[in-house]
Amino acid sequence: MKNKSLSLIVLATLTLLSATASAQATAPAARPEHTLSGNLSLNSDYRFRGISQSWLLPAVQGGFDYAHSSGAYAGVWASNVSGNSYNNGAGLETDVYGGFKFNAGQVAGQDLTLDLGALAYIYPGARLNSAPGVASDKKYDNLDLYLGLGYGAFSAKLSVAATDYFGLNSNTAAYAYFSSLAASGSSKGSAYLDLNYNFDLGQGITLGTHLGYLKVRNYGDLSYTDAKISIAKEISGLNWTAAVVGANAKKEFYQVGNAAGQAAKRVGGTGLVLSVAKTF
């Protein structure tokens, strides 16, 4: 009788251990507490909100991102920019950002995510000109506060400038050259609405669509709408993208000449942008 009881105990223990192991094997992997990732890309042009930042020339870009399992994140990203657009500087843009992303529940069976954060655009050494060829002490640096929303293949983000919009105010002569700018004052509070929807076409191909609208506070002539449509596919561990990008920004305000003020290019015109990227 004693041996029979012992056998039953051993059998029950083995059954419990087997069930526990099976449950652990089928349970989803726990999200890492800390995640660090990086990215590097080569682009035929650097378009920001539809406007070329590299004078329609190639740009090398890359950055690092940190994420915590709580939803907090931070990162840094950099790209070369044109000294024709950002005078007197190192030809570099460095972005530093951080925020908190969290699940706000489900709507019609889909997760709804919210993203709150801040992003600083920094242009080392760059200063606006107080007169043609004469540097001022006014920086191009800009700080945005943003609210993002994600729902399935759709995402939206509203960014609001907490500073003068990339140095724009009534004292920055680089913008005052255009006498038709009737408004003046601070551009703090300028806002950009960013809408995106991605379509899975199968075979690892993604069709991306984007529509954006920039509202420049006190400078309505500088406001515009931009759009992009792209095709992306991963090949040999690299992400390849081709995109058609353009904006209806007024040509007289969105054209940039060289250091001599000649050979002006329309930096908001429609163009094809090619890129290859690697994440790690």
Image (tube, rainbow, N blue to C red):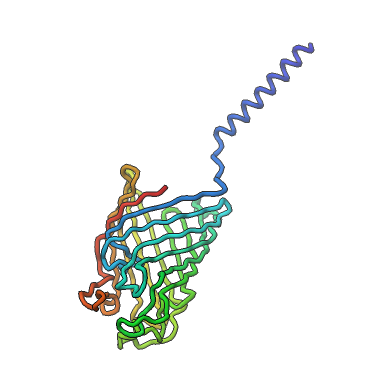
For the view shown, which residue lies furthest in the left direction? Answer: 263
Report the residue at 27% width, 68% height from top: 55
Report the residue at 27% width, 56% height from top: 274
- In the rendered image of this protein, does residue 260 appear above or below residue 109? below
Task: Judge left or right: residue 99 versus residue 40.
Answer: right
Work out whether residue 179 or residue 111 is closer to the camera in this orientation and state it: 179
Report the residue at 69% width, 23% height from top: 13
Location of the N terminus (image quadrant): top right
Work out whether residue 188 or residue 156 is closer to the camera in this orientation and state it: 188
Residue 44 pos. (x, y %): 27, 59
Work out whether residue 253 or residue 96 is closer to the camera in this orientation and state it: 96
- In the rendered image of this protein, does residue 177 appear above or below residue 231? below
- In the rendered image of this protein, does residue 202 appear above or below residue 97? above
Numbered-mark total: 0
Residue 101 pos. (x, y %): 53, 58
Task: Judge left or right: residue 141 versus residue 272.
Answer: right
Residue 237 pos. (x, y %): 35, 43
Report the residue at 42% width, 76% height from top: 139
Task: Judge left or right: residue 74 versus residue 84.
Answer: right
Residue 204 pos. (x, y %): 33, 45
Q: Residue 47 lies in what quarter of the image?
A: bottom left
- In the rendered image of this protein, does residue 90 appear above or below residue 229? below
For the view shown, which residue lies furthest in the right direction? Answer: 2
